[in-house]
Image (tube, helix red, strand yellow):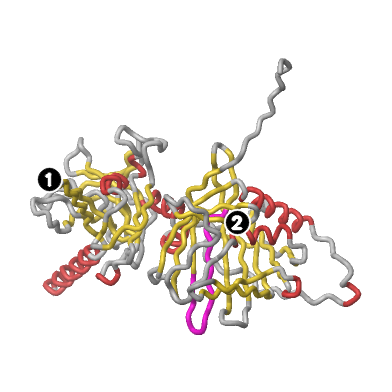
Amino acid sequence: MLRYFAILALLLCGSTAFAQEQTVVPITKLRIYGPVGTATFGSGFCLDAECRYVVTNYHVAKLMGKNFSIEHEPIVERWLATGPDDEGATKEGYNLGHDLAVVELRHSLAHKGYHGLKYNTDEPAEGQDVDIYSYPLEFNPKRKMLHFHGKFLGVNEPNGLLVFSYEPNPQHIKGGASGGLIVDSKGRVVAVLSDIALNQKNVCLGVSIDVLSAFVSKNQPYMAAELFPKSVFIPPVAPDYYPEWIPVAPQSTDLMKRIPESPDVLLLRDKAQGIVDKSFSMISVESFEWGKDSADNDPQAIAWYEVRMIDGDQHFREYPDGKKELDDVPWPPLNNVIAPGDAWYSTPKMVAKEYHLKIRRMDDIQVKGQPVKVFQYFGAKEDHVCNFDDQWDTGFLTIHRIHTYDCYGEVWTDQDENIIRISQNFHMLDSWSDWHEIVTFGWIEIDGEKSLVPITINSSAVQKSHTHWCRGLFTNYQQFRTKTRFLPADPQK
């Protein structure tokens, strides 16, 4: 019997190690300068289940530069959690407690067997057992993953890094291990390996999952809503809370009367107008990901553009070096695609200015323990409130067919009626059906001034048996404005 349990324990340990082996990835970049070459090494691990996003350290990502690949998949975007101008930055040029980066791959590594793990957002208990997986640099450039047993010792107060002891096996953690994985006894991620303690033998440091979840929530809210649901207040794809509202048609005697709107609705319209007004002084980078069927599938196309409003219309420039103004985002080379258009601007404008739009206040709801006000709206087809642009690209020109439909949705606000979410829905009878659109809003601060701006935009529609989707994220907000000063005239002239 003892022998049976020993064999079972070995099998379980082996399967756990194999799971981490399919999660941790080596990161290597070779640079050739004529007859001389250099190599940079690091480690990383899969952030998401499909392994299209990889977590590593800030200092690893900076050493690699913007152009590198992981497991032969090129990097298409990267997000850095810190930098030399960050609060708490040290002589190393970054905040050690935020030594994180996330990179996006062109295609996921799921087809190679890689996958993400679950996360434990609770701080480890002192003395708790952990396991560390990484790719330290050895004499053989073709590194292998090494596994170390360890224990949690506590928190390094100056920078918030978690401190772990580990047992050599007989190798030690050394260069190339940065960005590795630290998991608890259940295989859940508890920290990102970032450094070794120079003043203590066999001790390493890790960035906590709290820092990782906050970082991912800010830069990838779609991913964070799935991986760290507690960190995202309003999920970017949350469904409407209440059933569809279809107002009762007015009697003929009421057609000439306009029912006064409640103070809540009037305030909502004012708040929506504030978002519209602010959009004319903002420029941001909007990302686009086009996909089909499940949102877990790899996007079929990806793009980034600078976007801003000019005379009430959105205009684009290619990011980061585009010079030419574009009226529309170029369609990706796919047969059937959708795009959210200017919903980030048109939906708050509709709430603010379309007085044919019927709006009513509903009972408050609780989201993550916080009260949220909900308003329902309905726009009738005959009032031309909601339009849909069905475009057909012939190869020589684009044919636009504008359709008007009944539309409905919800506006969510905080208790001061600052808008945090607007949804829009169409029931279409043409080639497309069941159009859903959600825009979320959040606060940013530029030059000490706080502004409520769009954060995410998500659209989906059904064509025959397939669901097509396009989702985007607004980042890198900048404010542009013209300042005019009146100077007193010179009496000598």
Magenta segment: 454-469
Type of amino acid at the residue the image marks with label 2: Ile
Q: From mark 1 to mark 2, how far is it between C-alphas? A: 54 Å
Q: Is residue 92 left or right of residue 387?
A: left
Q: Residues within 10 Å of mark 2 (few under 14, many from 20)?
A: many
Q: Which residue sits at x=60%, y=69%?
A: 240
Q: Residue 180 location in percent, x, y? A: 25, 53
Q: Which residue is mark 2?
A: 420
* Residue 429 vertical placement versus 8 (above, below): below
Q: Which residue sits at x=46%, y=58%?
A: 287
Q: Is residue 51 left or right of residue 335?
A: left
- Mark nearest the camera among 1 and 2 is 1
Q: Residue 94 location in percent, x, y? A: 34, 39
Q: Nearer the viewer, residue 435 or 156?
A: 435
Q: Which residue sits at x=70%, y=73%?
A: 245
Q: For residue 295, which quarter of the picture?
A: bottom left
Q: Which residue sits at x=24%, y=50%?
A: 151
State which tag comes first along the sequence, 1 or 2.
Answer: 1
Task: Tell which residue pokes out farthest to the right in this image.
Answer: 253
